[in-house]
Amino acid sequence: MQGELSRDGLGAARDQLDELLRALTHDPAPNGAGPLMDRKVRALCGRMGQTTWEFVHGCAEKFGPGSEFTFEDLAQGFGQDVGTVKSWHRSASKSINRVNEQFGGAPVFESRWDGSRQHYRVPAETREAILALGKVHEEN
């Protein structure tokens, strides 16, 4: 493996190592989610800090399958102001975008614009994998 010694270079090296480890392990999914989604959510959790993972887990926990939510809904559900929720979302989005690119398949969050604001939802398979993994952050 080769790469530059920088944040992006180390991130690319980690992605390559994750790919090799996925090929070597045959971790059965502990839930109704498929093995790909289970690995994707585990990788996501490993990339996040405790607060960011609790945000992602809370989105899956507080909003049922097919439920859409906005930043305002999240602020009310978490008992925080919209600015705090937007900050958590920005932090989570960086890791979510990386694992969506790395693993493909269903996205962690889906979104739609209604002309005035963004609406989000957690797809059923993703939600199952997140809830099965649990609220406690896994340290790598």
Image (tube, rainbow, N blue to C red):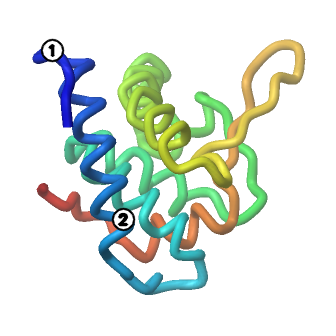
Q: Residue furthest right?
A: 115
Could you tell me how far apart the alpha carbons at marks 1 and 2 are, in whole angstroms? 24 Å
In the rendered structure, which disc, 1 or 2, sits on the residue that comes first in sequence? 1
Q: Which quarter of the rendering shows the N terminus?
A: top left
- How far across and down, in percent of the image, does residue 104 sit? 60, 48
Q: Which mark is residue 18?
A: none
**Mark 1 and 2 residues: CB-CB less than 8 Å, in contact?**
no
Per the image, the residue denoted by label 2 is 22
Q: Residue furthest front?
A: 1
Residue 73, image quadrant: top right
Q: Is 21 situated left or right of 95 in this image?
A: left
As drawn, 31 above or below 50: below
Residue 2, image quadrant: top left
Q: Which quarter of the rendering shows the C terminus?
A: bottom left
- How far across and down, in percent of the image, does residue 96 sit? 47, 38
Per the image, the residue denoted by label 1 is 6
Label 1: how many residues lie within 10 Å, few (<14), some (14-19) or many (20+)?
few
Name the residue located 63 percent from the left edge and 46 percent from the top edge.
107
Pick the front one: 65 or 128: 128
- How far across and down, in percent of the image, does residue 60 sit? 54, 58
Count of marks overlaid on the render: 2
Name the residue located 15 percent from the left edge and 14 percent from the top edge.
6
Q: Is 114 situated left or right of 100 in this image?
A: right
Label 2: how many residues lie within 10 Å, few (<14), some (14-19) or many (20+)?
few
Q: Label 2 is placed on what type of residue?
A: Arg
Give the SS element for disc 1. loop
Name the residue located 47 percent from the left edge and 82 percent from the top edge.
29
Name the residue located 23 percent from the left edge and 35 percent from the top edge.
13
Give the SS element for disc 2. helix
Residue 26, image quadrant: bottom left
As drawn, 113 above or below 134: above
Q: Label 1 is placed on what type of residue?
A: Ser
